[in-house]
Image: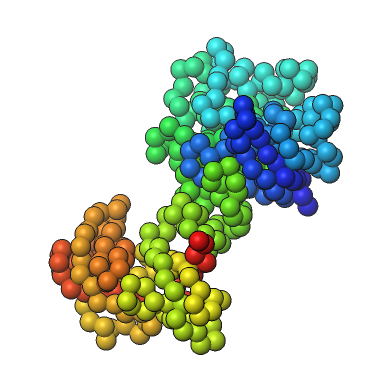
Amino acid sequence: MVLLDASGLGQRYDGREVLKDINLEIERGEVFTLIGPTGTGKTTLLRLLDLLEIPSSGKIYFDGTDVAASRGARLEARRRMSFVQQGPVVFRMSVYDNVACALRWRHVAHELIRQKVGSVLELVGLAGQRSQRARTLSGGETQRVAIARALVTEPEMLFLDEPTANLDPISTAQVEEVLARIIREHKTTVVMATHDRLQGHRLASRIGVMIDGQILQVGSPNEIFGSPVNREVAEFVGVENIVGGVVVEKDDSLASIKIDGVAIQAVCEFVKDDRVYVLIKPEDITFILSKELSSARNIFEGRITRMAPVGSLVRVEVDCGFPLFGVITEKSKQQLDFQIGKQIYASFKATAVHVIKKLD
């Protein structure tokens, strides 16, 4: 069931168009993550959806009610929402009082405040710091106070703007664990904006990719990261192998795509003479020393031009007449005796190739 529906949303500041024709439906109980580069309009969209700003164009429906046009409807809807902004502010008081203030402003009974605050502090892992001054906390702990303050009113919809921006990896992991617990136990509808595409993948049930004030693709994490709809989305989600070519043959669903004098076999919907981009994820490429070791349709001889460590893996760049990037383990690198300049083979299946239209 749709809880929030945005239709044709646009926003302009001093004649500058910040958001363009945003159409978005948020289902009750889902976790929707907006990912995109910094400065692309994610915060502005959150502020519109949270009804902190009025859009220059378009409509917003919350639980079936048009809330963009009526001040009274906006106020009523906002009581059912909470917003955790990037770099949250805490007051000069204890952790407990920071969280309790939202309930005191609503004139909730003292005993009920005690119960609700105690419960939410347990949820975010700060029960032991309830009496500590909030401004003495670490960045990650401060973010958890802000999340607790947003949750204590039991909102139907929670907005999070870059919830782990500027946090160290340990604090980021702690905040993500809190968010995962909230999602798992409370079934709160969550809309989160982040420039961290992998964080979006870890937490979301659906993802929207936002670039230059537009949502270019909406889908499941697997759809977004496995089947990007255009080059801009592919580049943002980290697809490194993106090469342009032309379909030269088509036999049922199997296409032969000519790229810089070589042909890549791919399963796709495009027809002969279509200009396309071929996308191959690095993890789908296998490096071998002999072409007889692979049954894949695509096997290309090439020369290693670069290697670099990436966490526990090694990123390998191979010149096959066109550049290909793959990853292997350090152990495999040593076993295969990979060195710069070595001739090897890169192989990948036709089904591992994602093909998109090349727009002029």
Give the x, y percent position of residue 74. Answer: 79, 30
> Which quarter of the picture shows residue 111?
top right
Residue 89 appearing in the image:
yes
What count of labels does the image hold? 0
Question: Which sits in the foreground, 283 or 172?
Answer: 283
Q: Is residue 62 above or below residue 201?
A: above
Can you name the residue that lies furthest to the top here? 92
Q: Give the residue at x 67% y 18%.
A: 101
Question: Which sits in the foreground, 202 or 45?
Answer: 45
Residue 66 left/right relative to 22: right
Q: How is the image coloured?
A: rainbow
Q: Give the residue at x 51% y 74%.
A: 274
Residue 26 left/right relative to 41: right
Q: Is residue 298 above or below residue 332?
A: below
Q: Is residue 321 above or below residue 252?
A: above
Give the x, y percent position of residue 7. Answer: 74, 46
Residue 351 left/right relative to 44: left
Q: Give the residue at x 56% y 46%.
A: 210
Give the x, y percent position of residue 280. Answer: 41, 67
Residue 67 left/right relative to 282: right
Q: Give the residue at x 26% y 62%.
A: 316
Residue 228 appearing in the image:
no
Question: Which sits in the foreground, 92 or 131?
Answer: 92
> Which quarter of the picture shows residue 100?
top right
